[in-house]
Image (cartoon, rainbow, N blue to C red):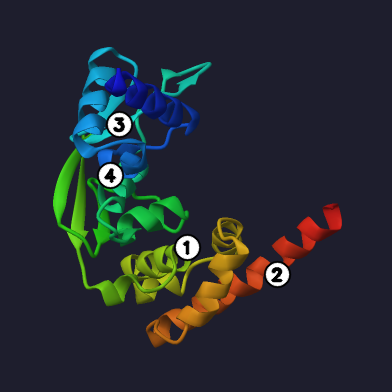
Amino acid sequence: MALQTVADKILRRIEASKGSVWSAGDLADLGSRSAIDQALRRLWLAGKVRKVARGLYDYPQTGAIVGVKAPRADRAATAAVRGRGASIRPSGSVAANALGLSTQVPARLEYLTDGIARTITVGGQSVRLRRVSPKRLKVAPGAGALIEALRYVGKDAVAQLTDGHMARVACTMKDADLAALRNARRHAPAWMLPTISRVLSAATPVTRTGDDDA
């Protein structure tokens, strides 16, 4: 009976999370580790939750056109390190593609972490978690992803990025990201500074437009 109660609580939390990926460590407040592990297994065998990767679960989301949506690799990667208290950041190739700074789709998804290096399989796709120095991940996620993207694009190509690129990047950033990006200029290579300044400048009209519409 106790296990069923734990299972009910787990199912409600995962179902309400709208596509988030969970590990047993994320659910530690709902019961003992053994109870949580057994409850997750029972829910999976019953088809009530989906196993995204080893030790990772979600509640499948459905769309009107695509039907059941594939699990998101970025959420799975985050969940894989979150329970260990580690940080994570998309690698340069992943960040550059996501931010529209590169049209090249990464052949392999890779994320940087200061936790344990490992490779997980998500939806049949290999996702590598590569260990790097914690110092490299000190910058807040949004700003850090841009710096990794610029590092990947390279000094010569960065100089050719258009104002449209800058505007698209600025639109992805929240106020906290922009504040972190301003602070990050102290740690970024000198050749990145003009591009970072262009992103910050592009963010100003975006913010102003939102205020006017309000």
The reply to whether residue 47 is in sight is yes
Q: Amino acid at mark 4?
A: Gly
Q: Position of residue 201 (x, y in %)?
A: 64, 74
User: Separation of disc 2 and disc 4 at Cα?
Assistant: 40 Å
The mark tally for this picture is 4
Which residue is denoted by mark 2 in the rendering? 204
Q: Secondary structure at mark 4?
A: helix
Foreground tag (2 vs 1) = 1
Q: Secondary structure at mark 1?
A: helix
Which residue is denoted by mark 1 in the rendering? 142
Q: Position of residue 141 (x, y in %)?
A: 43, 63
Left or right: 154 in relation to 55:
right
Q: Position of residue 128 (x, y in %)?
A: 19, 49
Where, by quadrant of the figure, is residue 209 drawn? bottom right
Where, by quadrant of the figure, is residue 34 drawn? top left
Q: Amino acid at mark 3?
A: Tyr
The reply to whether residue 124 is in sight is no
Residue that protrudes farthest toward the top in the picture: 46
Which residue is denoted by mark 4 in the rendering? 25
User: Separation of disc 1 and disc 3 at Cα?
Assistant: 25 Å
Q: Secondary structure at mark 3?
A: strand
Task: Name above or below for residue 87 compared with residue 109.
Answer: below
Mark 3 or mark 1, which is nearer the start of the sequence?
3
Mark 3 or mark 4, which is nearer the start of the sequence?
4
User: Separation of disc 4 and disc 3 at Cα?
Assistant: 12 Å
Where, by quadrant of the figure, is residue 57 drawn? top left
Classify mark 1: residues with Cα within 10 Å, few (<14), some (14-19) or many (20+).
Answer: many
Depth check: 192 or 124 in front? 124
Foreground tag (3 vs 2) = 3
Q: Amino acid at mark 2?
A: Thr
Classify mark 3: residues with Cα within 10 Å, few (<14), some (14-19) or many (20+).
Answer: many
